[in-house]
Image: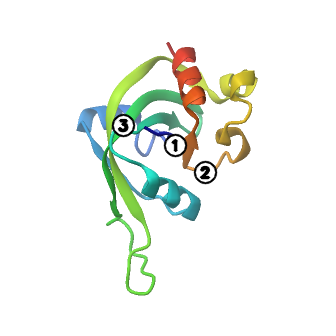
Amino acid sequence: MNYWLVKTEPETFSWDDLVKKGKDQWDGVRNYAARGHLKNMKVDDLLLFYHSGDDRAVVAIAKVVKEHYPDLTSKDMVKGENPWVAVEVAPVKKLKNPVTLNDVKTNKKLKDMILLRIGRLSVQPVKKEEFEEIVKMGS
C-alpha cells in the first residue's frame, strides 16, 4: 500500500462534497510530477485529504477506488492523445481535528515531508510514518 496527499481548494471541491457524492474522480491535475503520482496510485492506497487556500489543513482520509484513466476534463492533446489522467477516490473518514500546515511545520517527525518542500504540488507521495503521524495528530 502507498500513501499520498491530495490538495484541493475547498471552495472548488471539499471533503463534504466528496462525502455527499460517495466517490468521485480526482481530475484537473495539470502538472507532470503530480500526473506521475496519479499514475502510480493503486486501488486501496490511502490519501490525506488536504484543504488548501485559507484552511491549509489535512481534514480527512480518502482512498483510491479506481486507478488512473484519461482525464476527460482536459482538452489538451499531445500527438493525438490526452496527456492527463484522473483517478477515482472515495471517503474513508474525517479527522477529529484538522492538522494544519503550521502543525506539520512544527512537528519534527514531519520535517522532511514533500508538503514542506514543494508546497504547490497538488498530488504528492507521503511516507507511511508521516501518514500515521498526521492521523495520530488528527485523532
Sequence order check, earlier mark of 2 and 1: 1
10 Å crowding of disc 1: few (<14), some (14-19), many (20+):
many
Quote the CA–CA distance across marks 2 and 1: 8 Å
The colour mode here is: rainbow
- Residue 98 in view (yes/no): yes
- Residue 47 position (above or below residue 104): below
Taking the spot 60% from the left edge, 33% from the top edge, the residue there is 56
Sequence order check, earlier mark of 2 and 3: 3
The tag on residue 7 is 1
Kindly state the secondary structure of the residue where label 2 is placed. Answer: loop
Taking the spot 45% from the left edge, 82% from the top edge, the residue there is 78
* Residue 85 percent coordinates (x, y): 40, 62
Quote the CA–CA distance across marks 3 and 1: 14 Å
- Residue 93 position (above or below residue 19): above
Taking the spot 70% from the left edge, 23% from the top edge, the residue there is 109
Amino acid found under the numbered disc labelled 1: Lys
Mark 2, mark 3: which one is toward the viewer? Answer: 3
Closer to the camera in the image, 94 or 9: 94
Closer to the camera in the image, 10 or 39: 39
Residue sitting farthest toward the front:
1
Quote the CA–CA distance across marks 2 and 3: 19 Å
Mark 3, mark 1: which one is toward the viewer? Answer: 3
Amino acid found under the numbered disc labelled 3: Lys
* Residue 18 percent coordinates (x, y): 32, 37
Kindly state the secondary structure of the residue where label 3 is placed. Answer: strand
Q: Does the CB distance between marks 2 and 1 fall below 8 Å?
A: yes
The tag on residue 63 is 3
